[in-house]
Image (tube, rainbow, N blue to C red):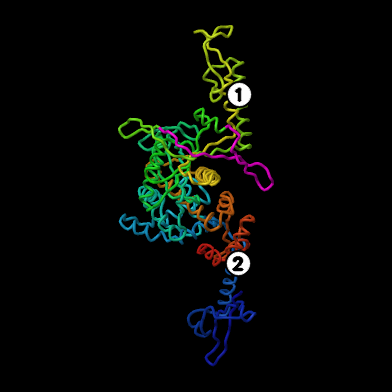
Amino acid sequence: MAYFLKKTNNKKGTYLQIYESFYEPERGHTAHRSFKAIGYVHELIEAGIEDPIAHYKEEVIKLNQIRKEEKNTKKTKQISDETPEKLLGYFPLKNINDKLNVKNYIDLMQSVTGYRFNVFEMMSALIYARAVFPCSKSKTFEEVVPKLMENCSFSLNQLYSGLEYIGLEYEKIIEIYNHQLQQLYPFDTSHSYFDCTNFYFEIDKEDDFKRKGPSKENRHDPIVGMGLLLDANQIPVGMKLYPGNESEKPVIRNIIDDLKKRHNISGKTIQVADKGLNCAENIFHALKAGDGYIFSKSVKQLPETERTWVLLDNDYKEVKNKDGQLLYKIKECVDDFAYDIKMENGRKKTVLFREKRVVTYNPKLAEKQLFEIDRLIEKARELKSSQAKKSEYGECSKYVTFVSGNKDGEETDGKIIVRMNNKAIEKSRSLAGYNLLVTSETKMNANDIYEAYHNLWRIEESFRIMKSQLDARPVYLQKKETITGHFLICYLTVLLTRIFQFKVLGNKYCSEELFNFFKGFKVAKISDKKYINMSKLSNFIIELTEKTNLPLTSYFLSDGEIKKMLSHRF
């Protein structure tokens, strides 16, 4: 509170001390204590101080001035080179990551490397940073990692070295995570979902890994392909990267074989994939391995007899919602279907497979497809009337024919003329809204087959999370191992998010709600042990507060409450 000079008279003389007053909360009033013992007045005079009382009164005045300045400084606190903002939304991912106890295994892996930083700590920091604020690795190191609640002790060079190391060992790291997940949240491999995508690079030069190929964004940059396998609950089981110019169709065979060996997945796995991976070799390979499949098939490419069966109204069963509105119509059949398979010697062999075919008609899908067909037809008519070049037709060229003809429109060997292909138009319009699924599971209920296939959107959502929420592309890294390390970080972020979403929260919230929380839950440090909550209140935060009994809605948060969040166990 304040300093003062205390004078005590006794037999030896007047004794001087500087005292300070302070508030004692237990007693509820001001108390005093000795700050500095000075000595007897006569001894101080002998030591050369002419007027000790006046001298030390001046010192007390200076001490009080210093204290006053310190008080004023605290009141008008200056900014520092460290931001008070802290990113805390990643704490559910940290809770799960810590609970899996992966650190011990990765520490053992690291023991042979000689690294002077902790690989698991670095990897975890990158996972959390990816969830709360995805950006380049250098920006992550400089701007995001310092805002995490834990102090991370690695340099930028060590970050790149660690990224290269985990990229080199990415399959082992996924295997460790899967082993630990099986103890707490076992995988359901009764059927699995598989799909592929690719990621482009902001560079021109190709190498053995980054190859120019058909980018999903229609870009001409080098790309890397990724295959992703999910279990029946849409939890990621494995990831495989491959050069961007390779076909996706053989990848499904290699990944599933590799994953079943690496993760001791036994029993029958039903592979669920879209028509892009539906080929005779994949079907043959799945059956040979004792697995099954559910693939979609283009109704436009069906033989005439099968297409006729699709369009016949008989045997369709209607599926309606609780309000009686038609959701879709469905019918099925089981038969032997011929496939031409390319054998190891290069020759083709026709093989019969016993399959169930499930066809559905969805009125909303039909409406959407008819709109797109009409748009392309209209565009083709406009191009035809303006005598556009053949190269300008693009996708709508399937609704026209190009023939040589004279000025009267008669076919000759002369000028190219354009005619509307009414047969193609009629075929497209008649098949709008229909979708065909082929499966080896002949005893499986048709509606279960339909539901299993339509859950494939989850894997597409996983790719979308990587590309949008986690900003996995474009990729600026150069080395194959650091690129793989980057995608491993994205994969593990999706994995922990999915565990939180499905296993902890029971699939009650969409991915967007989770990432809004990860990115938006922030605090600001206002003193050594106190924070203020800067997050915007949402239903998700309210419900997560009720589930965890954590003070997520409190405006003021203590250091202990923050630590409680970071160490929480679901």
Choose top left, top right, bottom left or bottom right for residue 320: top right
Answer left or right for 76 relative to 246.
Answer: right
The answer to if 329 sits in the magenta stretch is yes
Give x and y (percent) for residue 3: 59, 76
Tell me the number on the disc at residue 104.
none
The answer to if 300 sits in the magenta stretch is no
Q: Nearer the viewer, residue 10 or 286?
A: 286
Callout 1: 10 Å neighbours few (<14), some, many (20+)? many
Asked if residue 183 can be seen in this view, the reply is: yes
Q: Nearer the viewer, residue 142 or 354?
A: 354
Give x and y (percent) for residue 9: 57, 89
Mark 1 to mark 2 CA distance (whole Å): 78 Å
Identity, as a three-letter code, of the amino acid under mark 1 = Ile
Give x and y (percent) for residue 515: 56, 51
Q: Is residue 356 above or below residue 32?
A: above
Identity, as a three-letter code, of the amino acid under mark 2 = Lys
Write the residue at 50% across / 82% down: 44
Give the dominant element type of the magenta stretch: helix, strand or loop: strand
Q: Earlier in the sequence, mark 1 or mark 2?
A: 2
Please report the bounds of the magenta region as a residue range: 311-339
Write the residue at 37% across / 59% down: 105
Callout 2: 10 Å neighbours few (<14), some, many (20+)? few
Numbered disc 1: secondary structure: helix
The residue carrying mark 1 is: 377
The residue carrying mark 2 is: 71
Please identify the quadrant where the N terminus is shown: bottom right
Numbered disc 2: secondary structure: helix
Q: Which of 94 and 359 is in front in this view?
A: 359
Give x and y (percent) for residue 309: 55, 32
Q: In this view, does 177 lie above or below 139?
A: below
